[in-house]
Amino acid sequence: LSSSLVSLYSEGELGRVAVRGGVQVALRYEPAAKELHVHVLRCRQLAEARRQRSDPYIKTYLLPDKSSHGKRKTTVRKRSLDPVFNETLKYKLEKTDLQGRTLNLSVWHHDSLGRNLFLGEVEIALGAWDWANTRPEWFDLQPRGHRGDTAGMGGHWWDGGHPMLTPPLPPGAGLPPTGELHIWVKDARSLAPLRRGTVDAFVQCYVLPDDSKASRQKTRVVKRSLNPLFNHTMVYDGFQAKDLAEACAEVTLWHREAFAKRPLGGIRLSLGTGEGSGTRGRGQGWRGGDARRVSAGSSYGLPVPWMDSTAEERGVWGRVLAQPGRWLEALLPLRSD
């Protein structure tokens, strides 16, 4: 595995389409349940993510909260530029808390390989909303970062989801802005052949400390290749700049067998405080394998086994934090643990 390499990009966005169309939404506050109900009815005349089709879904946040806890999603509607959702997304909060909040509703094309494509967004200043109006209303979709007539955001700076670790938040603007981490796994090279002389490879990623199933993202399996090309983007959102300093992007390579998977190695991108020594057996420290490891470093002040990035891996992660909004390319050797 010493000659095995993985090519990776981070912090960016792949693919854009010209935004068009609209979304129909009804808003209602339920005092008894203390809930905001966002009834998403339909979209019309959406942009084509592929030839004459899109697979759209809708994602919402109550700004300035853009954490994963504040995210709501509809189901995906396949092969439609005029999808009907008829779904209600709910937020638990007091009505007085709606003052200063902005509903951000964005439409996305769902790609089976994880390269979701932005199709447009709407922002509604809830502090100025007429709550006697519960009728469905049509809103024109706007490009990312469009301010339009929704300036009632209390001075909060937000650019619609682009990676944004800067500029600093103005005083009194509420919660800090958050951004997205994009990891483009391009390819792997010079893999060691297995028993049959080849490999059925795929890549798996977690952004630790979140090792839940929701955090796991995978590429497709590339069969019978020692130089597999993945060209797959993994997107993680809801990060603040300080979070990335405590986080670790664990990117691992696996061989897919009939009823199991076999670890081939990986990398850990972090500002790791450990040694990256790989003192345990091959692959035993990777998520999805046997993750029982001794503590190697710390995250948010707690001892953890995965903050063990090598000097080369730490260097890449440091560049990511120092240059938000830019693609940063790295060619890194796989390690066994």
Image: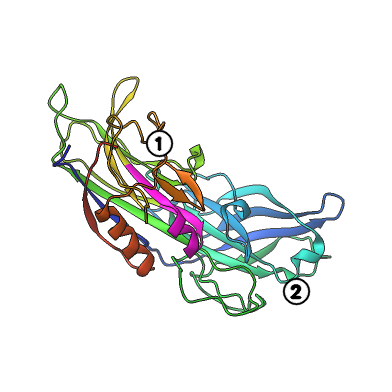
Q: Is residue 120 visible?
A: yes
Is residue 189 found left or right of 106 in the rendered image?
A: left
The numbered disc on residue 272 is none
Q: Find disc 1 in the rendering and name its residue.
A: 294
Is residue 183 found left or right of 100 in the rendered image?
A: left
| Residue nearest the observer in this picture, 11 or 172 | 172
Residue 116 percent location from the top left of the image: 43, 52
Determine if the magenta segment contains residue 249.
Answer: yes
Residue 297 percent location from the top left of the image: 41, 47
- Residue density around tag 2, few if under 14, some if 14–19, many if 20 or more, within 10 Å: some
Identify whether 127 is placed above or below 81.
below
Which residues make up the magenta segment? 235-251
Identify whether 300 is placed above or below 18.
above
Is residue 134 found left or right of 263 in the rendered image?
A: right
Residue at figure coordinates x 18%, y 31% from the top left: 224
What amino acid type is highlighted by mark number 1?
Val
The numbered disc on residue 128 is 2
Please report contact status of discs 2 and 1: CB closer than 8 Å, yes or no. Answer: no
